[in-house]
Amino acid sequence: MVIKKFYFVLLGCMVFFPAVAQRSDILEEYVREGLEKNLSLQQETLEIARVAENIRQARALFYPQVTFAPTYSLAAGGRRLQFPVGDLLNPVYSTLNEMTQSNRFPQIQNVDEQLAPNNFHDTKISFQYSIYNPEIQYNYLIQQNLLSAQEAKKKVVANELRYTIETAYYQYAQTLEASRIFENSLRVMQELIRLNQKLVANNVVTKDAVLSAEYEFSKLDQQLAEATKNQQIAQAYFNFILNRNLQEPIAIDTALPGKLSTTNLTTSDLSGLTGEAVQDRQELKQLDYSITAAQNALRMQEVAGRLPSVFVGGNTGFQGFGYTFSGQAYLVAQVGLSWDLFKGYERKSRTQQAKIQTDVLKVKHQEVERQIALQVTQAYYELMATRQNLRATEVGLSKASQYFQVIDSRYRNGNVLLIEFIKAQNDLLTARLQQSLSRYDVLIKTSLLNKTIYKP
């Protein structure tokens, strides 16, 4: 069920140092399920697909563009071309006919044509191919950089989700253990009540001993109810992260607390961990790709400002009045060049804007690098502190257990007061809860350290 390797770093002054990987097959399967079903990660997957389509669109600009574009026009009214050619030439033609005594020069009408073409078609195929265009070339590179940045962002979300699943799993397991601790304490208190009832019946103690034990039992019952509520909330939260039914049962790896590493981390490990984190963290890789995209945008503006774009194209088809196609074929070939000689310093401004964006991302990279180093340092010392705390709670539990056994034996023999027994019981309960919290806290802090150094 869930993917997670618990890396506890061993001693080592080198950058390459061995680590103890603690695995739980159940938890690993849950992590795998969460990575597949979590809605936030699904959104990142869709974002990657969207950016990938941008690459396909940028690649399409390298290919020829062929368009079939027929048009047919009907027109009525509007401007007209009027020229009195008949009025000018007909008297001359009449005089010539009289002189030649023939009809060789016919009478003609004045020109009165509508300018908007009526019953006119232009059925053509257009072709255009970019021979050289730096904006197309660099746009394709930029889209590739943005896709890589988006993929790195998805890994950032997956790394955070992995840590969230592990933490929620440990918290749920700890609430189960806390409930068992309270249930065990309730059984001890029930036995105390029965013992006190027998002692009262034998006139060894007064009835207030029973009432006091019953009061302590009610307090434990309230604490158990609170622990049960926390368990149900933790269960719902864990299932929410995995996009499951909130009441779905959760399998617990009972051997997980026993897999804690007792290896101590040394200060020399911290530098190695920090270096590894700076090298592997996807937040920095995402910024690296974004910086590369900004640099390509800068080069695009610089090159496009210096060099022209060259393309070839043409049109072929039929054009004329009525769809006769007879004598209407035509062919036009083109070679074009586009060169921005002056655009009001727009290109210069775009170049400067790209430089500023590159500088912003570089400063952001330095900031994130320092933040990561701080995160690793905090997680490192928190893990060391929780391990020390765990050892202290284990010693405390051992002492509290031994003390309770002594008090329990003496109480049964009537050598200590009830208040001493209840105090010993409460101390033992507190020690067990603290030890339980410390064990799972070590697992949580280990998961946090793995997250900060990106250990999937």
Image (cartoon, rainbow, N blue to C red):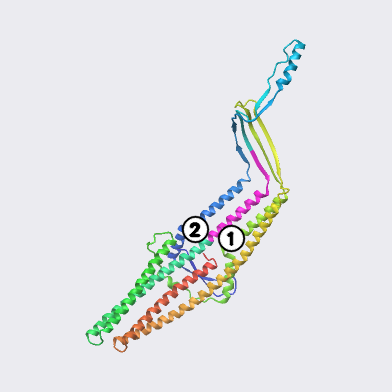
Residue 16 in sight from this viewpoint: no
Tell me if 171 is positioned left or right of 11 in this view: left
Name the quadrant containing residue 360: bottom right
For the residue pair 36 and 124, the one nearer the viewer reads as 124
Question: What residue is shown at x 47% (from left), y 65% (from top)?
Answer: 164
Q: Amino acid at mark 2?
A: Leu
| Vertical position of residue 427 compared to residue 312: above or below | below
Residue 128 painted magenta: yes
| Vertical position of residue 106 compared to residue 305: above or below | above
Badge 1 vs badge 2, beta-carbon distance below 8 Å: no
Which residue bears the numbered disc 1?
286
- Magenta-drawn segment: 127-155
For the residue pair 30 and 342, the one nearer the viewer reads as 342
Decide: few, some or many residues near mark 1? Use Cα within 10 Å; few <14, some 14-19, many ≥20.
many
Disc marking residue 323: none
Question: What residue is shown at x 44% (from left), y 65% (from top)?
Answer: 27
Residue 201 in sight from this viewpoint: yes
Please provide percent x and percent y for residue 412: 29, 86
Q: Amino acid at mark 1?
A: Gln
Question: What residue is shown at x 46% (from left), y 62% (from top)?
Answer: 31
